[in-house]
Amino acid sequence: MPKSFEALDWYDAPRYYDLIFDTDTAKEADFLEGIYARHGNPRKVGKPLAVLEPACGSGRLVVELARRGHKVAGFDASRPMLDYARVRLADRGLKGKLFEARMESFDVPASAAPKAGFDLAHCLVSTFKYLLTEADATSHLRRVAQSLAPGGLYVLGFHLSDYSETKQSRERWVVRDGDTEVVCTIHGWPPERRTRREKVRSRLVVSEGETNRRLETTWEFRTYDADQARRLLRAVPELELVAVHDFDCRLDREGELGEPRLDTMLILRRTLV
């Protein structure tokens, strides 16, 4: 008989989610600081930055950047994730402003908003693709732009689609922490140009001592090829594209949008007008 999976959104299981993605936290934080040093306000380089993280999830980057002395704020639509992030900050004696909001409709509370605007915002690893319409994607970018100080940066990471792809994809990670083991398998279906959708499924097999859980979540992403991404950016002139990197987070490797890899980090800067 096939093994059954519990239909639990993995965003409702923040500890397991955190174990999967936490291995790259320090590298991503280094990259964000390096990108700001290269493209941000020269007068702020080397000083504490005001940083906003849309879809901050379990708070791994909120915590890491706060630990480095930055003034951090973040929001997420998942209350369990935010609760977990708040505990992580408190356990480490760190400060950060966290609030519940959606990416397409967020407003930064006055208590969390710096007077001059945020120096840096970031949203990595394709969370942006949860915005399933052009209107929602545009609204999100405009709201981020409004939250940034003039010249502030938005580092936006997401996977571009190859519409000629016909094969399904599969990625697998195994992470251990004490007596906890998490096996994460991400299964992706080919993108559909007509609908601008791609189906994704995550399966988590969790072992904690003698307890085992099997969790599954299925969702859809909005798809973008390079031309579709450029068209979206043209609709938000408040943000200019100043550089393109990839998910390797290497400062010494820049590329063009859509080349040579589909994993794309867009470095966007708030225009001065």
Image (cartoon, grey):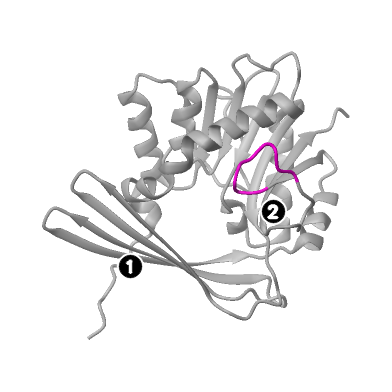
Q: Which residue is mark 1?
A: 7
| Residue at (28, 67) in percent of width and height | 6
Question: Which quarter of the figure is the N terminus placed in?
Answer: bottom left
| Front one among 183 and 198 | 183
Inspect this view and state whether residue 108 appears.
Answer: no
Q: Where is residue 147? Give x, y as percent.
A: 69, 31
Residue found at the very far front of the displayed protein: 252
Q: Position of residue 148 (x, y in %)?
A: 71, 29
Q: Return the residue found at the far right.
A: 273
Q: Which mark is residue 137?
A: 2
Amino acid under disc 1: Ala
Quadrant location, the C terminus: top right
Q: Write the start and end of the magenta stretch as one range.
A: 246-254
Q: Residue furthest left?
A: 210
The residue shown at (63%, 40%) is 250
Q: Tell me if residue 187 comes above or below residue 17 in the rendering.
A: below
Would residue 137 appear left or right of 241 to someone viewing this image? left
> Is residue 239 one of those drawn in magenta?
no
Crowd around label 1: few <14 · some 14–19 · many ≥20 (10 Å): few
The image quadrant of residue 185 is: bottom left
Secondary structure at badge 1 equals: loop
Badge 2 marks a residue whose secondary structure is: helix
- Magenta stretch: dominant secondary structure: loop
Q: Amino acid at mark 2?
A: Ala
Calculate the distance from the C-alpha at mark 1 to the C-alpha at mark 2. Answer: 28 Å
